[in-house]
Amino acid sequence: MPILTVGDRYQDVWIAGILATLMGAANALFLSWIASLFDGRTVVEFLEALGSSLLAKITGLIFVIFTMHVASITLRDFGELMVTSFYGETPLIVFLVVFALLTAWSAYAGLEVIVRAAQFLIPLTVLGILISSTLTFRVDGLENFFPLLEKGISPVVRGGITQWAFYGDVAIWFMLLPHLNRSVRHYLFMPLSVLLAGGLLVTVLLFIVISLGARLAAIQTYPFLLAVETVSVADFIERVEGGFLIVWVAANFIKIVVFFYTAVFTMGKILKLNDYRPLVLPLTVIMVSLSILLFENYDQLRNFFRPEVYAAYVSIIQVFIPLMLIVVWLARKKRGRAQ
Amino acid sequence: MTIIVGDIMLNQWKKLLKKVFHKPSNTQGTGADRGQDIPVSADLAQNVACLRSVFDRCSDIIVREFDVGPGISLRAAIIYVDGLVNKKMLSDDLVKTLMYEAGKLKEKASGKNAADFFSEKLIAFTEVKHQRSMNDLVDSVLTGETILLVDGINSGFALSAQDWVQRGLQEPDTETVVKGPREGFNENLQTNIMLIRRRIKSSGLKFETVKIGEYTKTAVSICYLEGVVNPKTVGEVKKRLEGIKVDGILESGYIEELIEDAPLSLFPTVQSSERPDKVAGGLLEGQVAIMVDTTPFMLLVPVTFPQLLQASEDYYLRWPFASFIRGIRFVTLNIALLLPPLYIAVTTYHQEMLPTPLLISIAAAREGVPFPAFVEALIMETTFEVLREAGVRLPRNIGQAVSIVGALVIGQSAVTAGLVSPAMVIVVALTAIASFTLPSYSGAFALRVLRFPLMALAAGLGLFGIMVGLLAVLIHLSSLRSFGMSYLQPLTPTVWRDFKDMFLRLPWWMMDTRPKLMGKMNTVREEPGQKPKAPKRVRRTMK
C-alpha cells in the first residue's frame, strides 16, 4: 500500500514502516493466539459452539460487511489508478467490471484454486517489486534520509498507526481456518506473513525516499509509480511502469479475491448454506456497485485512509472483535467450571 | 430471501438444461450385433457351416478343409484372414504336418484326450489356445489368429501365426532429437510393447491389455512399472477405460478425449508421445502409459504442465546445456503466447514504455499502414496459421510453392504494398519460430489458440487486458487436475525437491528422487553420492 501511505511530509516514513510492521506483527501474534482457540472452526462456528448464536450472526455479518467494504475500496482504488495513470480515456466502470468478473470466477473456483494461483503469483509479485524498486536506486538520493527525525517522534508514530491498520487483514483468517491444513497447529504464520509484507513495504518506502525525496513523494498521489517512471538505466531500461502495472494488477487481484471470497464464504456460513456458490454473482454485483457508490471522487477515498478514520475502522475487526471473543470465551469457561 | 429465490431459479435452470440435453439411456450397446453364444460342437461340418454363415461375403476370410493323414480319415479345417497370417508358416508347419505326418505317429488320438493330443503332439506352434465358444473363435480369427478345427473335437485351436505388413521403426516426425535414440513407435502394438520391454527389463513392467471398440476391437494396453507407479492411478486408468463404450477406436486421440480430466479445456491433461525412450522415462517416473494398437502415439498419464515443456533430449545432453535449453524454452513459451499481444498493447496504449529511438522507428514503419495494430496482427497471424495448415495438408512436392508464396508474396509484398508494417512481420515470424520450440504438440496448440483472445484483450485494454487474460489462464490452470495430480505441480503446490527437473535439469547424480506423487511408491531413484571424481593423480617424485 505504499501508494496510499506516504501521506505526511517527512523523510522518516520508513521508520514509521518498521514501527507499523512491529505493531502489526504483535497484533497478529495476538490474533493467532485467539485463532488457536477455534480448533479449526470459523469464528461464526466458534461462537455458535459457545452457545451465542445471535452473537455469531452479528460477528459474521460484521465480517461480511468489512471484507466486502475493503474489497470494494481496493477495487475502486485499483480502478482509479488505472484511469488516472494509464488509461485516460477508458471509463472507470470497465476496469471495475472486468476485474470483478475475474474475481467472481476465481471465487467460484474455490479457495484451493485461489491459493494455488496466489502461490504462483506472489513470488513473481515480490520479485517484480524488488526489481523495480532496485532500478530506482540513485546514489545521490541517499542524502534524502537526512536529517533523521526532523520533526520529532510524533509524526512517525502517527504514520505508523496508519500503516499498522493495513496489517489487520490477517484477521480474515478467522473465517478461513477450516480450509487450513490440519497439520498446521500453531498459527505463527499470521505474524510471520505480517513481517514479510512489512519487509517489502519498508524496502519500497526506502527506495521511494531515495529516488524522489520526501517532499516530492508526499505531494504525489502515487509516489511509487512516479519513482519507477524516473527509471533510466543505460539508456535502455526506461520508464518501467509497464512492469509496475503488471505487478500491481497481480497484487490487487490477490487481495480483492481473498477478501471477496471471505465475504462470500462467511455469508454462506451465516445463512447455513451447503454451497456458497449461488452467492457469488449477487455479491459481485454488490461489490461493483459499492465501489462506485462509496466515494464520489478519489480525494474522498484518500480521506478514508487517514489514520483517524481507517485505523479506527479497522480496529473493530482487529481489536474489538478479538477482545469480545476472549470475554465471551472466558465467561463461558467460568460458567462451565462453576457447573 | 433473494438468495433463496436465486437458488430456486438456479435449480430450475438446471432442470431445464437437463431436459434440453437429455438423452435416452442406451443399454443396447452401439449396435455391433453379437448373436447368441453357441459352444463349438464336435461336428466339423456344423462348425464350418456356422463360421461360413458368420463370415458370409467376407472375401478375405479363408476357410480351408482337408484330411488329416496319412492313413486315418479325419477331417480338419483352418480358418484365417488373408493378409494377417504367415502363409508359409501355416502350410509348412501346420497343414503339411497334419496331412503327411499325423498318421505316422504310433499313438492315436482317441476320445476325450484328442484335443490335448493334437496340441501336444501335432501342432508345432508356440502359442495355442483352446476356444470352446463360437464367438471366441470369431474374435480370434478377426485378430489374425488361425483357427484349426478338427472333426470330433468340441473345441477350436487358436494358433498365433500373425504376420502382416508394417511400417519400419523410423525416427518420429513430431519429436526429433539431435542426440538420442532414433527409433519411434509404429502402428503395431506388439512391436511397440517390445520397444518398451527392451528398455525396461524388469518383471515389474506390466502390460494389461483390454479390447475397446464395439466394431474395431482395438487392443489397448495399460502399461506401468509396478513398485514405482501409484496403484491408485492404475486403478483410475482402468476404471476410465472400462467406461468407454464406442463403436471404434482409430487413434489414441479417441481415448484421450474419452478419459481426460478437463474435456472442455484448451490444455491437454494427457500427454502423447511416439518416442519409446520418452514413454520408458515416464514409466520410470511413475506415469502410466496407455498403448493403443494401430497408432504410433502412446498416451502418458498423469501429466503436469511443466512436463509438457520437457523434451526427451533434455536428459541426454549434458546438464548445463540441457538447463540452458530449458531456459530458452521458457523464454520461447512466453514469446509464443505473448509477443503479438504485447506488441498490440504497447503500440496502442503504452508507447511511453519503449525507448524513444525504438518508438520512432516503429512509428515510422507503421505510418503508412491503414489498419490499427490489432487488425494488422490478426491478418498476419491468421495468414500464418493458414500457411501452416496448408503446409501440413499439401502433397510434399508442392510444399516449396507454398513456402515461396508465404515468404515472398505475403511477407515481402504485404510490406511493400503498405498493408502491414515490417515490425509486425518480425513479430509474427518470431512468434511462429518460438511456437515450434515447444516439445509438446498439443501443448503448443493450446498456446496457439490462446494467443487470439489475448490479442483481443490487448487491443481492448492494453497491458491490463493481457494481465486479466493471463490471470484467467492461471486460475484455470490452477483448477486443472490430471489423474489426481495438480496440473501446475511442482510450482504449486510447491514441491521443492522436484525443482531439480523444472527450470533447470540438474545432473543425473543429483536427481536422486522421483517426482513426488507420481512415483511416491518408490521415491529413491538412485544411490546418493555418485558425483564422479577424477582419481587423484599421484605425483611422480624424482629421486
Image (tube, rainbow, N blue to C red):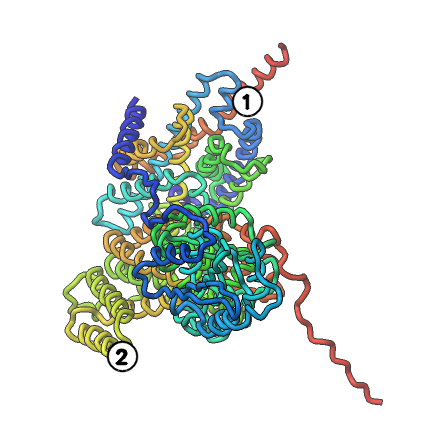
Residue B493 screen position, x and y as percent? 50, 48
Is B273 left or right of B33, judged from the image as shown? right
**Secondary-structure class at tag 1:** helix
According to the picture, the residue beneath numbered tag 1 turns out to be A326
Residue B289 screen position, x and y as percent? 49, 57
Outermost residue on the bottom side: it is B543
In the picture, the disc for residue A248 is: none
Residue type at mark 2?
Answer: Asn
Q: Taking the image as drawn, is residue A31 in sight?
A: yes
How many numbered tags mark residues here? Answer: 2
For mark 2, name the chain. B
**Secondary-structure class at tag 2:** helix
Outermost residue on the top side: it is A339
Q: Which of B376 and B16 is in front in this view?
A: B16
The residue positioned 40% from the left and 24% from the top of the image is A61
Question: Residue A263 lies in what quarter of the image?
Answer: top left
The residue positioned 74% from the left and 77% from the top of the image is B536
The alpha-carbon separation of the residues under discs 1 and 2 comes to 83 Å
Question: Residue B458 lies in what quarter of the image?
Answer: bottom left
Foreground tag (1 vs 2): 2
The residue positioned 49% from the left and 26% from the top of the image is A43
For mark 1, name the chain. A
In the picture, the disc for residue B397 is: 2
Q: Nearer the viewer, residue A336 or B237?
A: B237
The residue positioned 55% from the left and 22% from the top of the image is A326
In this view, B20 is above or below B126: above
Residue type at mark 1?
Answer: Ile
Residue A245 screen position, x and y as percent? 35, 52
Q: In which quarter of the image is the N terminus of chain A?
A: top left
